[in-house]
Image (cartoon, helix red, strand yellow):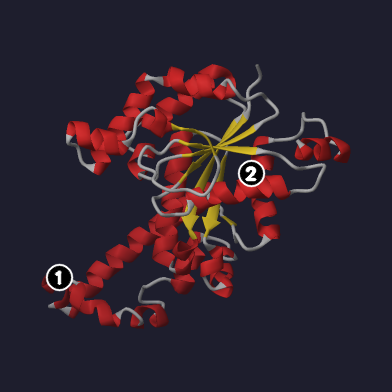
């Protein structure tokens, strides 16, 4: 039995991971006769409730957050960590399900959205290490999904870039960052940010600092949210803001020095956008290079079944 391709779809809660999985599954079936593929989607989120995609197999058949909360009286986050650690102790369940798919098949795994599972709790790292030991080393990649509203605000964009970089370094896999919900933001605003040559340039042009009067004036209405010790003295306020800006500039320089974080926009209402994202992901893992091109007659036969 060969080893199928695996996309591990990660990202913050509410970023649109499940929608991404659903759209890719539908798009795979709607592709032209010579490129059509059946994409199997796996739910690895024990806290999931509703999703629109067809599920190949589901971790909730093994364990679920609701069951753990009822039986062990844990909170939602503690229950989720318990579920993932339980999966680590029962990886034979995952192995048995994966063995049902051959090397010409394509899996997308919808992972939990709690970011701590990819940063300071090594649960996902251990799952990935186990998959490597089963022979999936050159068959896996990570797709990090983040909300496109992050790119319309410089501070959020820099924060999202750091999240993406952290996940990429932690998981140590071929990596693609996808901007979801692009249909919900103004295209011009998003393109303005994405066309910036560097994070430092983005902060210089759009960030909230003394050199950018427009951005700074837009935040005047929030001055009352600062601690009294900061607004009691204009000089002290300026000193603190100067320190914040130096820190932000240092973070931007870090992102620029590595030049490892880029984003691919996804508009679920645009077939060209979906095709571009899938092509980018395929290229990252060299998918299709060793597969025979299917003929139209073969595909029509499969579809007729």
Up/down of 250 relative to 225, above or below: above
Q: Of residues 303 and 243, which is closer to you in this image? A: 303
The secondary element bearing badge 1 is classed as: loop
For residue 79, which quarter of the picture? top left
Q: Of residues 213 and 48, which is closer to you in this image? A: 48
Q: Residue furthest front?
A: 305
The secondary element bearing badge 2 is classed as: helix
Question: Looking at the rendering, in which quadrant would you find the N terminus?
Answer: top right
Q: Which mark is residue 281?
A: 2
Q: Can you tell which of label 2 and label 1 is closer to the viewer?
A: 2
Up/down of 228 relative to 26, above or below: below
Q: Residues within 10 Å of mark 2 (few under 14, many from 20)?
A: many
Say which residue appears at 41% left-offset and 30% top-offset: 61
Q: Which mark is residue 172?
A: none
Say which residue appears at 37% left-offset and 23% top-offset: 88
Is residue 268 rendered to the left or right of residue 44? right
Say which residue appears at 54% left-offset and 73% top-offset: 186
Q: Residues within 10 Å of mark 1 (few under 14, many from 20)?
A: few
For residue 116, which quarter of the picture? top left
Residue pointed to by mark 1: 227
Is residue 120 rendered to the left or right of residue 142? left
Say which residue appears at 30% left-offset and 64% top-offset: 244
Estimate the x, y position of residue 31 in percent, counting from the top left. 74, 48
Is residue 284 rendered to the left or right of residue 51? right
User: Alpha-carbon distance for marks 2 and 1?
Assistant: 46 Å
Question: Looking at the rendering, in which quadrant would you find the C terminus?
Answer: top right
Q: Of residues 190 and 131, which is closer to you in this image? A: 131
For residue 247, which quarter of the picture? bottom left
Estimate the x, y position of residue 251 in percent, counting from the top left. 40, 55
Residue 259 shows in this picture: no
Estimate the x, y position of residue 176 in percent, counting from the top left. 57, 45
Up/down of 9 relative to 225, above or below: above
């Amino acid at each position: 039995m060969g080893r199928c391709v695996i996309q591990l779809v990660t990202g913050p809660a509410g970023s649109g991971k499940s929608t991404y999985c659903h759209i890719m599954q539908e798009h795979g079936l709607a592709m032209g006769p010579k490129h059509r593929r059946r994409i199997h989607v796996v739910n690895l989120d024990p806290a999931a409730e509703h999703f629109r995609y067809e599920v190949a197999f589901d971790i909730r058949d093994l364990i679920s957050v609701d069951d753990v909360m009822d039986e062990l009286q844990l909170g939602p986050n503690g229950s989720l960590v318990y579920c993932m650690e339980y999966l680590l102790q029962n990886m034979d369940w995952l192995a048995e399900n994966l063995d049902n798919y051959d090397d010409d098949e394509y899996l997308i795994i919808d992972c939990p959205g709690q970011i701590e599972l990819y940063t300071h709790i090594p649960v996902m790292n251990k799952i990935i290490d186990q998959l490597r030991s089963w022979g999936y080393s050159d068959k896996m990649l990570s797709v990090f999904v983040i909300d496109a509203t992050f790119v319309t605000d410089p501070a959020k964009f820099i924060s999202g870039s750091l999240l993406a970089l952290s996940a990429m370094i932690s998981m140590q896999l071929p990596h693609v960052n996808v901007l979801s919900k692009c249909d919900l933001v103004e295209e011009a605003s998003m393109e303005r940010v994405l066309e910036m040559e560097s994070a430092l340039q983005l902060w210089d042009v759009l960030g909230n600092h003394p050199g950018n009067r427009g951005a700074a004036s837009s935040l005047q209405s929030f001055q009352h949210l600062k601690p009294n010790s900061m607004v009691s003295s204009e000089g002290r306020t300026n000193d603190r803001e100067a320190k914040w800006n130096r820190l932000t500039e240092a973070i931007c320089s870090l992102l620029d020095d590595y030049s490892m974080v880029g984003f691919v926009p996804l508009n679920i209402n645009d077939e060209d956008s979906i095709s571009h994202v899938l092509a980018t992901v395929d290229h990252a893992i060299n998918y299709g290079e060793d597969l025979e091109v299917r003929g139209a007659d073969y595909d029509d036969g499969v579809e007729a079944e």
